[in-house]
Amino acid sequence: MLTLQRRGAHNINLVSPTHVIAQVAESLCIAREKGLAIPIVYNTNGYDAVETLQCLEGLIDIYLPDVKYSDDALAKSYSGIDHYVEISRKAITEMFRQVGNLTFNRQGIAQRGILVRHLVLPENCAGSEESLAFLSSLSEEMVISIMAQYSPQYKAKNIPPLDRKISDAEYEVVLDCALRLGLDRCFIQACESSETLFPDFSKANPFES
């Protein structure tokens, strides 16, 4: 982490770190004693225990969770997880309590707060309006990334309606909903992002641009 800071990194991005969070917390304390000053990002699917998040209070500057579904039955059917709505909403509420809305420095680089990602799914399988309404109830100033990049992969290709990408019209409905709820601090995408942002796994290094 200190090496990345010396190289000019804007932040330290911890991706899905929950299973090693005790080690992460200890390493952050050591690194900060040695001069680590750039923001720490907790990049998560949002299905986190509140007790785990409370152990991180004061160590995380930016929370970057997903909100995937607003229906437990669909969450169970598509992702095999139980009580998704209650668990994820409690987690996001705790993240918001700790760090508040996203703030930026003069260069436009995020410094502290929460940025929530929401992937729009075909035929509103994500329950976008309900999820956005929940986020709006926390704060109309919340920054949200409304993603259009859904691409059916693996078994999804045989499970309607997840067997297709979203349409422009479906995405526009969600954007309109966000604005109607007062959520105007949004990152948005073109629907073509399902092609441009998806790794090409036919390559030896699929993550090369």
Image (cartoon, rainbow, N blue to C red):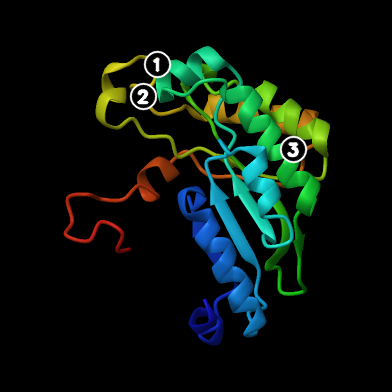
Whether tag 1 and tag 2 are in contact, CB under 8 A, the answer is yes
Q: Which mark is residue 164?
A: 2
Residue tagged by mark 3?
Answer: 93
Q: Is residue 97 above or below residue 60?
A: above
Badge 3 element? helix
Q: Is residue 29 left or right of residue 45?
A: right
Of the image marks 1 and 3, the number of the one nearer the N terminus: 3
Say what amino acid the circle numbered 3 marks: Thr
* Camera sees residue 142: no
Q: Relative to 102, is 72 above or below?
A: above
Residue in front for this viewpoint, 80 or 171 = 80
Report which residue position mark 1 lands on. Answer: 161
Asked if 115 appears above or below 83 in the picture, the reply is below
Residue at the (40%, 29%) spot, across then down? 165
Label 1 vs label 3, nearer the camera:
3
Tell me the CA gap for discs 3 and 2: 32 Å
How many marks on residues? 3
Q: Is residue 96 left or right of residue 115?
A: right
Quarter occupied by residue 94 = top right
Query: Horizontal and vertical percent for residue 143?
Result: 72, 47
